[in-house]
Image: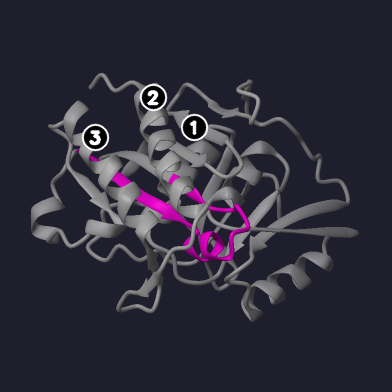
């Protein structure tokens, strides 16, 4: 299947431009059944991404946060599909702190093989293709292969956590790290940018001990993997197997993203 990564980056940027038009003005917020917020920007971004993908790659089906109600019996045998979060970090968007992203991933047989994460307020792009590495395009348009930084893990570790979903389980995990490392540095940022910080080498580990959905992490999963980081299921202090996508229930279990040499 001949899919061009720069097509997907361009779609993400176009969606990001539409998000920023709404971001710069007053906007209304409604709440979905799960009490998560939804804005005009979520819907506009979703419309742009889905319509453009259908135009360029009509043979590939789509699962998106905003049109996710596709029966499992219909999608369970898909070989390829797009997995999309048109506005990841809606809470950060509402707070107007700039820490939100557009996430687009291509899944093949339950694993991501391509991913794009675009932060429109920061003008940053992260992307990866299976076997071709991961890259960052900074706000000056310069492309850099990831990771950009490395930590030898001798006596310090950098932990990135959620601004909106920090909880007692995460705090307990971080306290356990303090028993192992002389210095534990805490970083906090919104949306899938947390995964990008680990892929970039700015952070060493990202624990997420709370509910997320498949579209929240798929693009970041392949970006991290192409920098030799890995997303692990985490339960009862144990690192389990890698994530699979297109499950009957699209909710994720707890996970960590880390370098294989950490803890």
What is the secondary structure assignment of the residue under circle 2?
helix
Among the 4 quarters of the image, the one containing residue 236: bottom right
Describe residue 40's horizontal placement relative to residue 189 as left or right.
left
Give the SS element for disc 3.
Answer: helix
Mark 1 highlights which residue? Answer: 127
Magenta region: 80-102
Say whether disc 1 or disc 3 marks the residue closer to the N-terminus. 3
Which residue is pictured at 71% across the width and 48% down the height? Answer: 204
Q: Residue furthest left?
A: 74
Say which mark, if any, is on residue 53: 3
Query: Is the residue under label 1 in contact with that under label 2 (CB below 8 Å)?
Result: yes
- Residue 169 at x, y percent in the picture: 63, 77
Which circle's residue, 2 or 1, is located before the other in the chain? 2
Q: Which mark is residue 5?
A: 2
Residue 32, picture quadrant: bottom left
Magenta segment: does it hold 126?
Answer: no
118 relative position to 205: left or right: left
Q: Are marks 1 and 3 in contact (CB under 8 Å)?
A: no
User: Quick one: quadrant of the N terminus?
Assistant: top left
Q: Position of residue 87 (x, y in %)?
A: 42, 53
Is disc 1 placed on a helix, strand or loop?
strand
Residue at horizontal 52 percent and vertical 59 percent from the top: 93
Which residue is at the front of the view, 100 or 144? 100
Binning the other alpha carbons within 10 Å of mark 1 as few (below 14), some (14 to 19) or many (20 upward) gives many
């Amino acid at each position: 299947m001949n899919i061009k990564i720069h097509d997907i980056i361009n779609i993400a940027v176009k969606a990001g431009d539409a998000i920023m038009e709404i971001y710069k003005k007053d906007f209304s917020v409604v709440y979905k059944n799960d009490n998560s917020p939804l804005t005009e920007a979520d819907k506009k971004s979703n419309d742009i991404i889905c319509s453009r993908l259908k135009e360029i790659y009509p043979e590939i089906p789509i699962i998106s946060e905003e049109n996710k109600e596709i029966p499992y019996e219909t999608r369970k045998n898909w070989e390829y599909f797009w997995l999309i979060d048109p506005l990841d970090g809606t809470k950060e968007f509402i707070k107007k702190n700039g820490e939100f992203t557009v996430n687009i991933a291509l899944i093949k047989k339950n694993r991501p093989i391509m991913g794009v994460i675009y932060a429109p307020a920061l003008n940053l792009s992260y992307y990866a293709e299976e076997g071709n590495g991961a890259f960052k395009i900074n706000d000056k348009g310069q492309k850099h292969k990831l990771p950009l930084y490395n930590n030898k893990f001798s006596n310090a570790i950098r932990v990135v956590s959620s601004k909106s979903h920090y909880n007692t389980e995460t705090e307990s995990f971080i306290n356990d790290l303090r028993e192992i490392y002389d210095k534990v540095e805490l970083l906090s940022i919104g949306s899938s940018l947390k995964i990008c910080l680990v892929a970039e080498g700015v952070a060493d580990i990202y624990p997420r001990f709370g509910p997320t959905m498949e579209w929240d992490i798929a693009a970041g999963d392949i970006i991290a993997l192409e920098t030799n980081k890995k997303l692990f299921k985490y339960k009862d202090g144990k690192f389990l197997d890698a994530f699979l996508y297109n499950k009957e229930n699209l909710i994720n279990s707890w996970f960590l993203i880390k370098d294989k040499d950490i803890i």
